[in-house]
Image: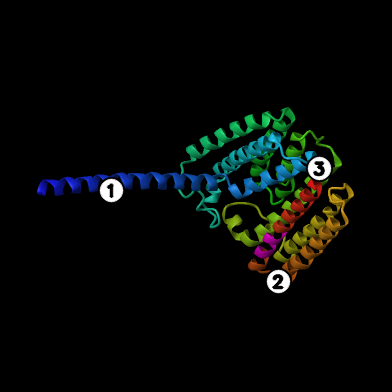
Amino acid sequence: MSVSIITSQNKVNQNQKVLGSSNNYIQSIIEFKNILMELTKFRITFFVTVTTTVGFLLSSGKFNLDLLIVSLGVLVLASGASSLNEYQERNSDAKMERTKLRPIPAGRISKNNALFISIVLILFGSAILFVNGLTVLLLGIFTLIWYNGVYTNLKTKTAYAILPGSLVGALPPVIGWAAAGGNIFDSEILALAGFLFVWQIPHFWLLLLMYDKEYKDAGYPTLSNVLNSAQIVKITFAWIVILVLSSALLIFVDLSSGIISNLILVVLGISVLFATIKIIKDQEREVYRKNFHFINLYVLCILFLITIENLV
């Protein structure tokens, strides 16, 4: 009797060990997934992939295998570029409250492992893009070099780095357009790229207004070194006005040609101006935050609008 009880207890202990090992294994996988999502800045890279998809659909007007390939290629390459950026900025990230919990400064992954992951992703992303042709690959590589080689370094040297840096966000739809067989100098894609280029400037400066002290503590030159807060706010709003005006280019090149879609585009623009003018009246962090999200939503709505119109 006692022998059978002991045997049963041993089996229970063994089962508990197996379950414990399984739980640890699952937790390790979940943690690695979380690290990878943060290291690759998945929300940003996903948006980059969306703009690539938009560029492709505006050019071809159809879903096909080429769309899947270029979208996957951009997602993987952008993930590699973002991982490399986190490797490059690991020391400054550790000094900022907003970024100190990123995987490398938080010690959740070693810098060498992060660098290895970024290299693997860049190589795989480049290989996938090459399937769509040499032009697509070269555009992807140029974007990578501009982001990690030019913009990332300029951020440590000038408060105006976002001006040339905005080219990074303007190129993904061009990549999608080219993958679908479009000419990269077509007026339609240049108008869309210009719109996204302009958007990134107030997008970043609203971020700066929220986290100016943290950027300074991390050693970055900021606009507040040469301008006061009121001046920065006015310049930011001026760029929001330019953003809304640049959306009119989408009408002129027929990316938005229907009466209803044009009306929606105009209403969205007016709404943005009425909403964001509050940053001049109420210079508070929460106001900056709300308008930061508002102009991002505005851009998403514009992308959705022109894509749907060109598909139906």
Where residue 216 appears, x then y in whole percent? 60, 56
Question: Are the residues tagged 1 and 3 within 8 Å (C-beta)?
Answer: no
Question: Are the residues tagged 2 and 1 within 8 Å (C-beta)?
Answer: no
Instruction: Name the amino acid, label 3.
Output: Ile
Name the residue tied to disc 2.
282
Disc 3 crowd rating (10 Å Cα; few below 14, some 14-19, many 20+) is many
Q: Is residue 293 magenta?
A: yes
For the point 63% across and 48% down, the residue is 44
Element class at badge 1: helix
Element class at badge 2: loop
Residue 108 in view in this figure: no
Element class at badge 3: helix
Disc 2 crowd rating (10 Å Cα; few below 14, some 14-19, many 20+) is few
Instruction: Name the amino acid, label 1.
Output: Gln
Q: Earlier in the sequence, mark 2 or mark 1?
A: 1
Q: Is residue 299 magenta?
A: no
Q: Which mark is residue 16?
A: 1
Where residue 233 appears, x then y in whole percent? 73, 63
